[in-house]
Image (tube, rainbow, N blue to C red):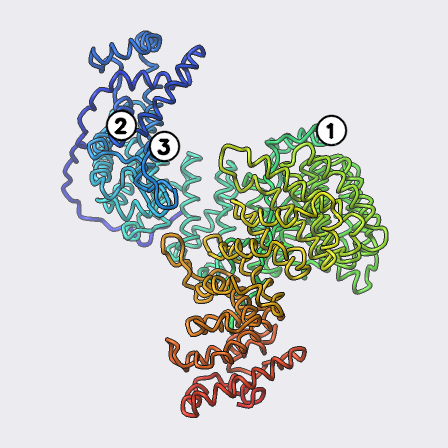
Amino acid sequence: LNLNSSPARRKKEKKMTTPSPPPIPPAPHPPNGHSLALLTALSPTSAPSSHARHTAALSARDAALTSSHDSYGSLCSNFARILGTTSLSSLPPSELTIFQNEDPTSCLQLHHDPTSYLQLRQMAGLLLKNSLVSPPIGNLPTDAYGRVVPTARMILPPSSRMEIQHVLLRCILDKEKSIRAAASSCIASTSLTSIEYYSTKMTPLPLKEWTDLCPFLTCCLSYGISCLSSPTAEVEALLDGALLTLRKCLEDNACEFVQDASHFPNVVPLLIQMLSVPNLPESFKREGLKCLNELVDPLPNELILHMNDYLKVLSDFAGDESVGVRKLVCQGIVQLLDIRAEYLRPHIAPVSSFMLTATSDINPTVSMEACEFWLTFASQTPDIISPDMSDTVQNLLPQLIPLLLKNMVYPLEKQQELMYQNEVDESDAVDRVQDMAPVFHKSKVKRPESSITAFGGTAEKHPNEDDSDEDDDDEDEDDEEANEWSLRKCSAASLDTLAAMYGPESILPPLLPALQEGLSHADPWVREASVLALGAIAEGCVEAISPHMGQLHPFLMSQLSAADSLPQLKSIAAWTLGRYASWAVDQQMSGTQPDLLGKMTEAIMTIILSRNKKVQIAACSAFGVLVESTGELMVPYLEPVYRTLVQALSVYQTKSLKILFDTLGTMADFVGPSIGEGSLPSLYVPPLLALWNELARANPFDRTLLPLMESLSSTALTCGMNFQPWALETFELAMTMIESCTMILAGAEDEIDDEEADPIVCAADLLDGLVEGFGENFGALVSSSTRFAEYFPTVLHMLTSHDVPGVRMSAFALLGDLARQCPTVIQTALPMLLSEAILCMEPMHESVCNNAVWAVGEVCAKCVDNSGALAPYAEAILEKLIPLLMGNAVDDDGQIIGNVAGLSENAAAAVGRLAKCNAEFVTKDLERFLMGWCGGMAKISDKTERRDAFEGFILAIRAKPQCIQPTASDIGDTITSILFAVVTWHLPEDNLGPQLLSGPYSFTPFPQEYAELGQALISLLHDLKSSVGNEKWNHIEGIMPVNVRKLMREVYHL
């Protein structure tokens, strides 16, 4: 790998001076005997009979750390002294006597075996780091909210801080590697880790104030490098400690280290100099490369200045005999490609050739790191990858594609492991808890699905939203393997992204011959990898591969039914069939293969009942993907499908059950109301309810219950009134779940964790599904419950005031749907519920705020003819909504939160509905938020909410027309905001680009179903034009885009 930018030139030799040794801090003061006795009592190697003494030591430690800042500093200093003291003999006789009196057994052991003191030193380093990184809270004052004030965190006195810093610097030169490691970890953690405590950030030993840390490290590096020709043990320890500390600091926070460390500019050239030393020991190569690689992301000027030298280092070590070194070379190249590809652009040809060779490295860790190069390359945007870079890699595809396919084959040791796992999976062994992937419930957030901006497409995605395609590159591995990134997975992902980047013209010619050979191979593991490759290219090559699917599809189907197929082969065949589900739908819709979906469903149902757990999970997942693609086309096959799935309920264990419940929910979401017709629900709903009852009685916090309740929620919503025979039992099971979990959590001593409340959240969402499915009939359902009818409003109020934000979020979604569908259920508790909703209309918890605002808007919509019910709350509601409309809401510390996805839309609809109840509710401060209201209305996608917002807006303007004049902004800006909000009624669904304003005219007519509103808007705009006068109006009209002027002229007659 030759990355030299230019031919080497002879440089004039400079006279070099030998660097001075680093200024080693003085030996620490000896620790006191009490601290040493405390440490031995805390040691896990202490005698089992000393349990009471160990417990007392824990209390003594906590008391010393929390009683005062001085006491905290004293104990931390003594931990540091023990770390820095090489033997027990360093203690003064008086302190040794104290230690001997307090712990004679440990003292005797240390005298007989002095080497055991090393373990105490390591333990002291760990306790020091923990005490500094997480300083305890003392018994100090609280603020007005009852929270401990930030200064309640223990703070090191200056004298203790200085002593600890000196000891740590001395310890990174210690002859014992374990002590160097402990000291370097402590330095990195305490100098760069900020402790978040409310609005205060604290760093125990801040790097900015530790001015001699980086100079000391660079001095160690400089001196150590100068002695590498004939290093002593002391020099090797010195260099190792400095590199270890530097690497850990850069791993923890490279940006902060680069920015705050004094003398940092010397670090990069020293690392380059060290890595250029001939015959450098492997450990120094690895540490030096790790340091330089960590600097690629912040990319300081010093690395930019030495970029050619860094590239030369990577080039020189590309063929190193050490696996670890070669792996780090690949990591460095991949990081450069990912972060600053322009530095690789001139060298793309040798780099790509090297990475191609490294992808076939005999060591899988090296080949996996090299394989990351192709995945990273194909994931870059076109502005990053220049045409010459793209062409270079494209020319390597004939060699690369077969190599990736080869790397997808499980290695021999993994094959043996999987064969053993197959035997376990086909047994009746119960799923182990440690094998379970965590299950998380996704609560309902009531915000528009696609909030439309005025003329720029769709609104930005909420930062907490996950837009990943859950089935992409999901080979449906076992849970343990799914959490492990491997060469096989990286190769499949690389092939997927390369196919999307280059398309079938470049991918299929080298792939198809290898694929044909692999699919007919005698080795089932090779066939399995080939099927994986076929699935991986589906997204990028589906159309081009379609002519071959007539042969490939039957082959995949045969892998499902073959008795001798490996479970892994059946699983990957099912996954690949799901990837080509769109092809199967086209075949059926076109009449080419009118019963193909039926054949696929039958084949998948067969393996759903497999004894192998991996096959069960893969089959359920694949069928779920098929259902998403087919929708109502699945209706003719529903009865045998549900019979099979119910049969699976009785044999599946935990892992498989979770996927099965997801599949049932997917059927409800995509097939539609047909799942509730005739006797179909009687096939699957009673077994689900029976299983729920069984699991909940055993443990209401069983995570398997979450997807079960989610599937029932979707089913109840989709079936509607057809779900009635099981509605009461479902309702009471959900209420019982809320009741039992709440009672159990109420008795817990610790603060409730969000995950612990998931069953309550899920049960509330199931109740919401019943509300949406039953509509106004939900009230009758509640009344029919002899156990919960009376208490339902109270339970709802409890949920809206719950400590866990996720519970409140789901509760407000339920409240809003109740207000919309059957308001009589909440009528008696409305004052309490509104008060809680108003309290939660603060965007510290964005989703809670969104749902609370939406729920208040739905309540307002039902009070249009009874505004008196809202009168006591109207002012408080408006005060909460105004900052949300204006985007200047603040948190507890006065920091502006800014825009939250969907929030301004919900707020605009709520204000409009409040104004429809009584325009006087919103006119008091109308000029404050008029433009924000217009902006929010422009984004509303739901037509009913949009209509209510505009109707309320018109009423408010009519009630206070003078609000247009005294606004803080220019009146022209106010009128323009109103006009552009009106224009959003005319946006076409499929053309929201900038050409809409000045290109071909494509605005749509005002919706006919809201013709009355359209006439009201025409009247309002004419009145606004009259109020501002012709001169001002002509100016406003002059700055309008041409198509907006045409719209205003033709539709609004302006």
- Rendering coords of residue 355 (x, y %): 47, 47
Pick whichever, 564 or 687, lies toward us.
687
Q: Is residue 268 visible?
A: yes
- Rendering coords of residue 393 (x, y %): 50, 55
Q: Quadrant of residue 283 in the image?
A: top left
Structural crowding at the residue carrying mark 2, measured as other residues with C-alpha within 10 Å and reported as few (<14), some (14–19) or many (≥20): some
**Alpha carbons under labels 1 and 3: distance apart:** 49 Å
**Alpha carbons under labels 1 and 2: distance apart:** 58 Å
Structural crowding at the residue carrying mark 1, measured as other residues with C-alpha within 10 Å and reported as few (<14), some (14–19) or many (≥20): few
Pick whichever, 584 or 227, lies toward us.
584
Q: Which residue is mark 1?
A: 428
Q: Quadrant of residue 83 in the image?
A: top left
Q: Amino acid at mark 1?
A: Asp
Q: Amino acid at mark 2?
A: Ser
Could you tell whether 107 is left or right of 775 in the image? left
Which is more foreground, mark 2 or mark 3? Answer: 2
Residue at disc 1, secondary structure: loop
Could you tell whether 1029 is left or right of 674 in the image? left
Q: Earlier in the sequence, mark 2 or mark 3?
A: 2
Structural crowding at the residue carrying mark 3, measured as other residues with C-alpha within 10 Å and reported as few (<14), some (14–19) or many (≥20): some
Q: Earlier in the sequence, mark 1 or mark 3?
A: 3
Q: Earlier in the sequence, mark 1 or mark 2?
A: 2
Q: Which mark is residue 282?
A: 3
Q: Which residue is mark 2?
A: 71
Q: Amino acid at mark 3?
A: Glu
- Rendering coords of residue 969 (x, y %): 38, 77
Q: Is residue 244 visible?
A: no
Q: Is residue 672 above or below residue 10?
A: below
